[in-house]
Image: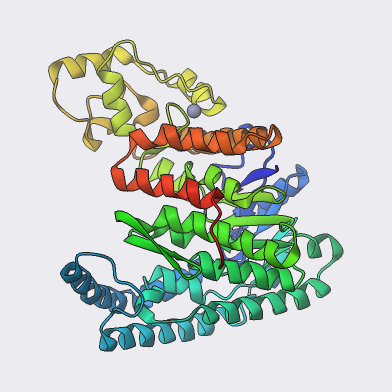
């Protein structure tokens, strides 16, 4: 199985150490291509590396969301009140008629605004081609992504499957036309964007793209992963599967949408798509699950800004042992301080280079713990005047200057390196015919490290990736 991650192109990700990480590739949207990034893009190509030109629609989805989020929040409050009374998630058809009509109206307005901003869904094509890319994220109807970003769920709006089918049909048709106008090398590396919000709509999307003979496809997963809502059931075909309590949508939906797409595609084409790009998916625990859901036979690729945002803004680092986790550096600092035998021994080239230049001084942390036996490490402890600033430079938060640059660079590099370890384990186990066992072991290691709803969502995800799911 082929599985690769495209770095978001920036001076923090395009460095000799990153370039050495196989199999490599970078992603850039033309609307983000400052002169500096456009120059980096040229260097990417002259290094012989792949450059994927994103369609830039992520920005537009954000604009639609910003314009209508106040209204959708107000609707959500009303729906929450109904769910609180019921003591469970709403099922289709249970929302009071008036409220459903208001949800539907807002979904119409989101659709209109999406059309106004995004036009036919390929407004950036000229800008994309000007980047001289090796892969192009293609035509997209951003409506479905806007609905997700605004929590306009089908259960609330009352919309039918056929609305997604129609959008996907239009996009697939445009993609077929577009491919005939592209130069050969890009025509075979053009990834139109499918839309879905569930197993069923993804199944339809897969079927539609297969019927149009499209073999390389992408789909947005950022909105699924940004969803903070919970639900106590999912629907597959006409069957409702009830959970024991409410589970986070993001994990169950991500796996079901992937599985649905491949099931639908195979049902029409008789085989898997040749290539599939997961837009906005970089959560360590999800990569093995969606790889398993794809069932093999497809070249998989991923991109996400989350490894960068996590590293810099949120102070979160990815680890693969004892489980695939995102850990807060503050927690790591407290963990190191509490036991003289513990060290940060990450073997990645980024941590190794950084700690040579800015070594950890573990004794400072132990002394701090001795003086504060019951205290959690706070953000202030890791700032320049904080007690742990010099103990753990990799976890420290210099406001600016060369040390800040070094910290950002090391953490961003580390997170991407961890993702590469995860993908390399997927490739190796798939090649050995042991992908299912590998992913089951990843999930088994993850479950005891998290809260019950997340553990159950991931456990269901493992089943959804492989079980017989019945008719869609
Ligand atoms: Zn590292």
The quarter of the image holding the C terminus is: bottom right
The quarter of the image holding the N terminus is: top right
Q: Residue at x 36, y 30 (%)?
A: 395
**305 and 220: which one is in front?**
220
- Asked if residue 456 shows in the view, the reply is yes
Percent across and percent down for residue 23 are: 69, 39
Percent across and percent down for residue 187 are: 80, 65
Q: Is residue 377 above or below residue 61?
A: above
Percent across and percent down for residue 390 are: 31, 22
**266 and 412: which one is in front?**
266
**Left or right position of 106 against 266:** left
**Left or right position of 136 against 8:** right
Q: Residue at x 53, y 71 (%)?
A: 201
Q: Residue at x 76, y 75 (%)?
A: 176
Which quadrant of the structure image shows residue 364? top left
Which quadrant of the structure image shows residue 446? top left
Q: How is the image coloured?
A: rainbow
Q: Is residue 337 above or below residue 468?
A: above
**Left or right position of 224 against 331:** right
- Asked if residue 397 shows in the view, the reply is no
Q: Residue at x 49, y 32 (%)?
A: 441
Q: Which residue is at the far right?
A: 184
């Amino acid at each position: 199985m082929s599985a690769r991650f495209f770095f978001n192109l920036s001076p923090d990700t395009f460095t000799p150490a990153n370039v050495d990480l196989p199999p490599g590739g970078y992603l850039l949207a033309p609307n983000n291509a400052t002169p500096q990034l456009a120059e980096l893009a040229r260097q990417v190509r002259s290094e012989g590396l792949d450059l994927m030109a994103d369609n830039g629609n992520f920005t537009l989805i954000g604009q639609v969301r910003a314009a209508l989020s106040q209204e959708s929040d107000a609707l959500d409050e009303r729906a929450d009140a109904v769910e609180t009374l019921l003591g469970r998630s709403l099922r289709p058809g249970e929302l009071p008629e008036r409220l459903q009509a208001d949800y539907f109206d807002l979904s119409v307005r989101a659709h209109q605004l999406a059309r106004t901003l995004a036009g036919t869904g390929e407004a950036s094509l000229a800008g994309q081609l000007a980047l001289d890319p090796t892969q192009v994220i293609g035509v997209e109807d951003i409506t479905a992504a806007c609905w997700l970003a605004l929590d306009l769920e089908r259960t609330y709006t009352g919309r039918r499957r056929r609305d997604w089918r129609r959008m996907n049909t239009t996009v697939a048709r445009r993609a077929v036309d577009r491919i005939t106008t592209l130069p050969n090398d890009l025509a075979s590396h053009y990834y139109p964007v499918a839309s879905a919000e569930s197993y069923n709509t993804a199944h339809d999307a897969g079927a539609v793209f297969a019927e149009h003979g499209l073999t390389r496809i992408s789909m947005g997963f950022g909105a699924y992963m940004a969803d903070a809502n919970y639900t106590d059931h999912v629907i597959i075909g006409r069957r409702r599967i009830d959970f024991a309590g409410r589970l986070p949508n993001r994990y169950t939906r991500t796996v079901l949408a992937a599985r649905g797409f491949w099931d639908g595609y195979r049902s029409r084409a008789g085989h898997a798509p040749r290539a599939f790009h997961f837009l906005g998916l970089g959560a360590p625990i999800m990569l093995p699950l969606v790889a398993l859901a794809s069932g093999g036979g497809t070249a998989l690729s991923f991109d996400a800004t989350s490894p960068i945002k996590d590293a810099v803004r949120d102070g979160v680092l990815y680890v693969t042992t004892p489980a695939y986790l995102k850990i807060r550096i503050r927690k790591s600092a407290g963990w190191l301080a509490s036991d003289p035998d513990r060290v940060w021994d990450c073997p990645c080239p980024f941590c190794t280079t950084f700690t040579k230049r800015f070594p950890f001084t573990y004794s400072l942390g132990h002394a701090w713990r001795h003086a504060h036996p019951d205290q959690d490490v706070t953000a202030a402890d890791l700032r320049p005047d904080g007690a742990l600033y010099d103990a753990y430079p990799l976890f420290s938060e210099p406001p600016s200057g060369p040390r800040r640059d070094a910290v950002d660079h090391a953490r961003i590099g580390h997170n991407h390196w961890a993702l590469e370890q995860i993908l390399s384990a997927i490739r190796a186990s798939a090649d050995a015919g042991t992908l299912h066992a590998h992913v089951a072991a990843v999930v088994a290691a993850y479950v005891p490290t998290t809260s019950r709803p997340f553990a159950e969502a991931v456990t269901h995800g493992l089943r959804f990736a492989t079980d017989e799911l019945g008719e869609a």
